[in-house]
Amino acid sequence: MSAPLLSPHRRAPHGVFAAAVLAMLLLPLVVAAFAFCIGVAITRMKGHHFAVGSITLIEVLRQVASLWSGLTGGGDGLNIPILPGGPVFAGRVFFYAMLGVALLVWVAAVAVDRSRLGFGLRCIGQNEDAADMVGVDVNRYKTAAFTLSAVFCGMVGAIYASWVSYISPTDAFSVLLTLKVPAMAMLGGLGTVYGPVIGATAFVLMEKTIWAHFLDYNQAILGLVIVLPIFFLPGGFLHIDYRRLWRRKPAAVPRMEVSRP
């Protein structure tokens, strides 16, 4: 959503690449600062209140972006200059940029998992009230996690806007897009390093399959895919005991009755 803020409507071809790189470097800092200001308040909410607050915040930002036409283009959106060098070169640039961000996210996840921040977040995930009672600063840890995740969202947003060459408030603040991210994490396994990777891969494959075979009912089926894991697979794929699932039960030995004289 933020890449158009640093991308003018017209720019010389030699400056398009520099503007895209500048957006990828600066926008994560801008988004992180904005997320920190919001996170101080929104991370104090719990459960359903946090979900409702997040969706409300999305709608408020969408309305602000739609009305602020001088900066965001309003409802018409913004056209981003196409990266020079042809579609093949641009495709390679964005592929490696996305791959680099994915690797950076994985490294950050491993580092957080092994740090004091990761330990505090695990305590909060198990029992937030108990973690607060033993001295874990719940709000500070949750705000740090919220801000750190926003850094990578800013990177991906800048790359995505430059890739599609167009961005609008409706696309940037989509509720369905907001629900997909936690659905991917829950599908793979919350609180794990590899869970979001597995969940994102499985979700994208299912989404593409549903779009290809159920064109008229894809939204309804995709909604079921998002909701069902919450009830029937709360731990995700990584918390399934596959050894127990595939373990064969020993065949029952028939009992032989001995008649008494």
Image: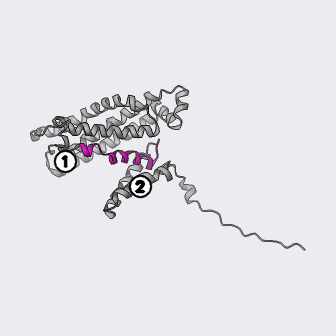
Q: Amino acid at mark 1?
A: Ala
Pointer 2 local density, CA inside 10 Å: few below 14, some 14–19, many at least 20: some
In the structure shown, which secondary structural element does the residue marked by tag 1 occupy? helix
Quadrant in the picture for the C terminus: bottom right
- Residue 259 position within the rendered picture, expressed as x and y whole percent measured from the top left: 85, 73
For residue 40, which quarter of the picture?
top left
**In terms of sequence position, does the residue under pointer 2 or pointer 1 come before the other?**
1
Is 184 part of what is drawn in magenta? yes
In this orientation, which residue lies closer to the viewer: 76 or 94? 76
Residue at horizontal 50 percent and vertical 27 percent from the top = 136
Read off the residue under disc 1: 90
- Residue 14 position within the rendered picture, expressed as x and y whole percent measured from the top left: 11, 39
The magenta region covers: 169-192
Foreground: disc 2 or disc 1? 2
- The numbered mark at residue 225 is 2
Q: Give the side of residue 202 with respect to residue 171, left or right.
A: right
Q: CA distance from mark 2 to mark 1?
A: 33 Å
In the structure shown, which secondary structural element does the residue marked by tag 2 occupy? helix
Helix, strand or loop for the magenta stretch, by majority: helix
Q: Give the side of residue 241 with respect to residue 156, left or right.
A: right
Up-down relation of residue 181 to residue 258 (above or below): above
